[in-house]
């Protein structure tokens, strides 16, 4: 026992010193497959802060194994065989070695275990106050969703914290299960085709959160406030509680490049970007609208496009097998800032009967504005 403890301390010390995250990918023990020391557990409950290698836990945290029963439900985990469950007022925390000033996106999987409104708080310490992430809506048939969340590093060593508060339920077993935590450095100023006069940043959505290779359900980008860092550089997700889905060409049909955005939550969420414009200039917004080849059958599937200066509905007839159409909106810029907004005008679910939310895919967006001859004449 003493020897065990000594070995454990050694191992822990080594683990914590090495808790760096050099490149993009899973955090060290980000999938919780390195087990906690048995002596620091009581049943499934983790009793010591550093019991799980590379992680610090507070409060009621359980270490759970895939296939164990909870009531009459068999627990599954999305990656490997283990995950953690956060009880009331508990957290898991991981130290990150980052570069001050740079932008990072964290991706993690979460599943709720009971039916109530569930939220987790994610934060970087030291950093801004925690951001609340609603996880009550389930966007996959497996019950697992991958979420992304982004931050700008203000120091070279920071801690990423997922905290679960008090849901006003007495059953600690109702907390969310967390697994597969990964990080990606974001390029906040993605390169653009030199010949392109596209005024939008990241119009092709190629820059975005980490998608775990082999994970078939994309990554959700949660709603954010205007001053929050977006996991999708350039773009804001505006909603109370709903998300958009970031999808990859390995598992979905994507109109252009290898990434796109699927608008899965109907009228309740908008994809937004704001750019500087010269008032009175004439602008053309071009975009692709399609379906992700995920069985989202709808004719029509209606995409709503709006700018400060004009709007239109685009009907795309989806057979759910993949495809897209190009469309455009011409308008006159009204002010020095123009807001570009996309949302799905309808609610859709996949035709496989699982009730999985789906919707139009938006990709390859460009905005080009030129001063109007009329405006030039007036200026002369
Ligand atoms: C372990 O948990 C059980 C059940 O909650 C409790 O009765 C017991 O006292 C705990 N043991 C220790 C060592 O904390
Ligand atoms: C998240 O953090 C905020 C600010 O600290 C707090 O007001 C809120 O209750 C927290 N929510 C959860 C779900 O823990």
Image (cartoon, helix red, strand yellow):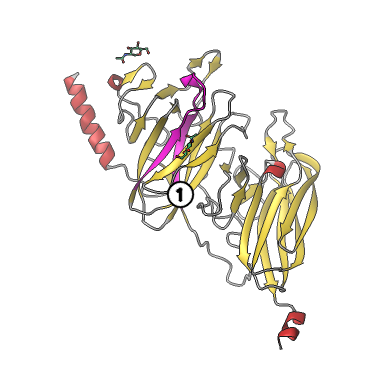
Residue 183 vs 139, above or below: the answer is below
- Could you tell me residue 141's position as x and y percent? 63, 30
Q: Which residues are magenta?
A: 158-185
- What residue is rendered at 49% in x and 19% in y? 170
In this rendering, does residue 293 appear at all?
no
* Quadrant of residue 321 within the rendered picture: top right
Query: Eyeballing the image, is 261 above or below 176?
Result: below
Left or right: residue 13 versus residue 354 is left
Give the residue drawn at x 21%, y 24%.
5
Locate residue 322, reporting x and y percent: 72, 45
In the image, is residue 345 part of the stretch drawn in magenta? no
Q: Which residue is mark 1?
A: 184
Residue 99 visible, this angle: yes
> Ligand 2 near label 1 (Cβ, under 8 Å)?
no
Helix, strand or loop under label 1? strand
Residue 159 found in image quarter: top left
Task: Tell me the crowding category of disc 1: few under 14, some 14 to 19, or many 20 or more residues within 10 angstroms, Cα based.
Answer: many
Residue found farthest to the bottom? 380
Task: Report the residue at 30% width, 24% height from top.
Answer: 37
Picture quarter containing residue 363? bottom right
The one of 26 and 344 positioned closer to us in this rendering: 344
Of residues 347 and 170, the one nearer the viewer is: 170
């Amino acid at each position: 026992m003493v020897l065990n403890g000594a070995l454990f301390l050694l191992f822990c010390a080594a683990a914590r010193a090495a808790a760096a995250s050099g490149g993009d990918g899973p955090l060290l023990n980000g999938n919780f497959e390195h087990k906690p020391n048995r002596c620091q557990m009581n049943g499934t409950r983790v009793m010591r802060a550093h019991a799980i290698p590379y992680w610090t836990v507070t409060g009621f945290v359980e270490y759970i194994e895939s296939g164990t029963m909870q009531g009459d439900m068999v627990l599954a985990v999305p990656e490997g065989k283990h995950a953690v469950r956060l009880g009331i007022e508990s957290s898991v925390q991981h130290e990150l070695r980052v570069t001050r000033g740079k932008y990072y996106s964290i991706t993690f999987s979460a599943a709720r275990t009971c039916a109530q409104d569930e939220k987790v708080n994610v934060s970087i310490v030291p950093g801004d106050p925690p951001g609340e992430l609603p996880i009550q809506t389930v966007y996959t048939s497996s019950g697992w969703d991958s979420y992304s969340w982004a931050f700008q590093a203000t120091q070279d060593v920071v801690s990423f914290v997922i905290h679960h508060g008090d849901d006003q339920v007495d059953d600690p077993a109702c907390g969310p299960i967390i697994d597969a935590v990964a990080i990606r450095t974001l390029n906040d100023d993605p390169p653009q085709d030199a010949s392109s006069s596209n005024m939008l940043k990241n119009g092709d959505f190629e820059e975005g959160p980490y998608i775990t290779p082999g994970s078939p359900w994309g990554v959700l980008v949660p709603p954010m406030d205007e001053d929050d860092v977006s996991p999708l550089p350039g773009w804001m997700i505006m909603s109370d509680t709903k998300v958009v889905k970031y999808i990859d060409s390995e598992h979905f049909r994507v109109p252009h490049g290898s990434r796109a955005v699927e608008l899965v939550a109907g009228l309740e969420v908008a994809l937004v970007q704001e750019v500087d414009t010269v008032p009175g200039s004439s602008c053309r917004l071009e975009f692709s609208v399609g379906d992700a080849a995920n069985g989202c059958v709808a004719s029509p599937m209606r995409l709503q496009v709006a700018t400060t200066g004009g709007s239109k509905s685009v009907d795309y007839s989806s057979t759910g097998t993949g495809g897209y159409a190009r469309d455009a909106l011409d308008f006159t810029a009204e002010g020095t800032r123009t807001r570009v907004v996309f949302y799905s005008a309808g609610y859709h679910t996949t035709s496989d009967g699982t009730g999985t939310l789906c919707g139009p895919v938006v990709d390859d967006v460009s905005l080009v504005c030129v001063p109007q001859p009329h405006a030039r004449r007036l200026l002369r």
